[in-house]
Amino acid sequence: QLEAYGQNAHFYTDKIIDNDTAWNNDIPYVILGKLQINNNATLTLNEGCRLYFHANAPLIVKGTLRVNGNKNNEVIFRGDRTDEYYNDLPASWPGIYFLPSSKDNIITYGIIKNATDALIVDSTSVNSNPKLILHQCIIDNALNSGMLSKNSSVTADNTLISNCGKNINIQMGGNYYFNNCTVVAYSNSFITHQYPVLQLSNHSDNNGITQSKDVFADFRNCIFWGDGGGFDEEINFSKEGAGIFDVALRNCLIKSNIDNSITQLVNVIRNSDPLFDSVDTYNNHYNFNINSPLSPVIDAGLDTSITALPYDLNHQNRIFGIKTDIGCYEKQN
């Protein structure tokens, strides 16, 4: 399969980034061993970069990752097998690991697909900024986790996390702000939908000892939806200990019967089909745009002047209609 790239690719085995480095969209980057960004180094991936990772080749971030994609010139992270059987196979490569020393990571218009764990975000930020910021990203078809975060800090807006084993899995607390995101999973021929799309806890068990940390999480204008799992609860929050557990769902559409015993529920829409454009699990086709005028998410979000997010995942204006829609896409007509 690697012969398919011919000479028209950068091939790296155990590539280590020790100094500030920028990669541009000239030819694909094929990573045969790990790609590692060391402490105090920044790897900048400019618009249109395509990174193909071998089956045992992770991206390890000890320093900083900056992704500068844009609409129609996204930066793509995926496995290096593009032949028909493997092209959409989950767990084709390990994923991106943000280690404790990592800081100031920003991914704009990144597509991260077919990993084992698309994003692992480990430990609190070493400064006052979020450890990871996601703008207008797509995270899709990860076998284990779309985002696994352990006592860390993540901010995301206008981002789609779809069809992963565990779409969002937050452990041991931390700080999280999600605005206008769509988090959705359907059982299909690759991954059986077995877990809620949003799991959040302030604790973990280590050798029978439960440890807990404070958690602050604010989810605004988000969709949390799933189907084919044989259950109706797509949100699971778990609290242990006497620490701070400050979690809110504001103007979200949720497939859930969660109560407000440990979370704030403000203007949530419960168990109402968002009416995505089209979903065909047999043919692995998913279009999570909102085109039906009957969708309950239309004009149901918090006012755009509050959320201050000017563009959706399609880079369309959020100021369309009375108020912003819920989810990563804004209906335009």
Image (cartoon, rainbow, N blue to C red):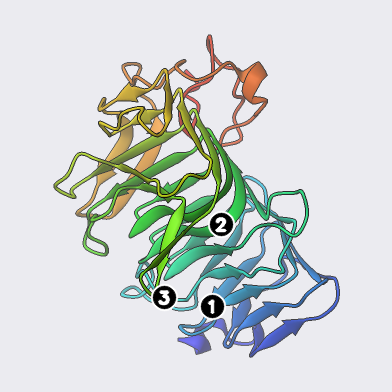
Image quarter hosting the N terminus = bottom left
Mark 1 or 2, which is nearer the eye? 2
- Mark nearer the N terminus (1 vs 2): 1
- Mark nearer the N terminus (1 vs 3): 1
Whether residues under marks 1 and 3 lie with C-beta atoms below 8 angstroms apart, the answer is: yes
Asked if residue 9 can be seen in this view, the reply is no
Q: Amino acid at mark 1?
A: Phe
Q: Quadrant of residue 296?
A: top left
Label 1: few (<14), some or many (≥20) within 10 Å? many
Q: Residue 92, labelled with which disc?
A: 3
| Location of mark 2 (residue) | 151
- Residue 227 vs 144, above or below: the answer is above
Q: Is 318 left or right of 206, judged from the image as shown?
A: right
Instruction: Give the total of numbered labels.
Output: 3
- Residue 247 vs 76, above or below: the answer is above
Secondary structure beneath label 3: loop
Q: Is 203 left or right of 50, judged from the image as shown?
A: left
Q: Amino acid at mark 3?
A: Ser
Q: Quadrant of residue 270?
A: top left
The residue under the point 53% across, 39% down is 217
Q: CA distance from mark 3 to mark 2?
A: 27 Å
Secondary structure beneath label 2: strand
The residue under the point 60% across, 84% down is 34
| Location of mark 1 (residue) | 53
Label 2: few (<14), some or many (≥20) within 10 Å? many
Q: Amino acid at mark 2?
A: Asn
- Mark nearer the N terminus (3 vs 2): 3
Residue 290: image location, x then y, percent: 40, 29
Mark 3 or 2, which is nearer the eye? 2
Residue 139: image location, x then y, percent: 48, 55
Whether residues under marks 1 and 2 lie with C-beta atoms below 8 angstroms apart, the answer is: no
Q: Quadrant of residue 77?
A: bottom right
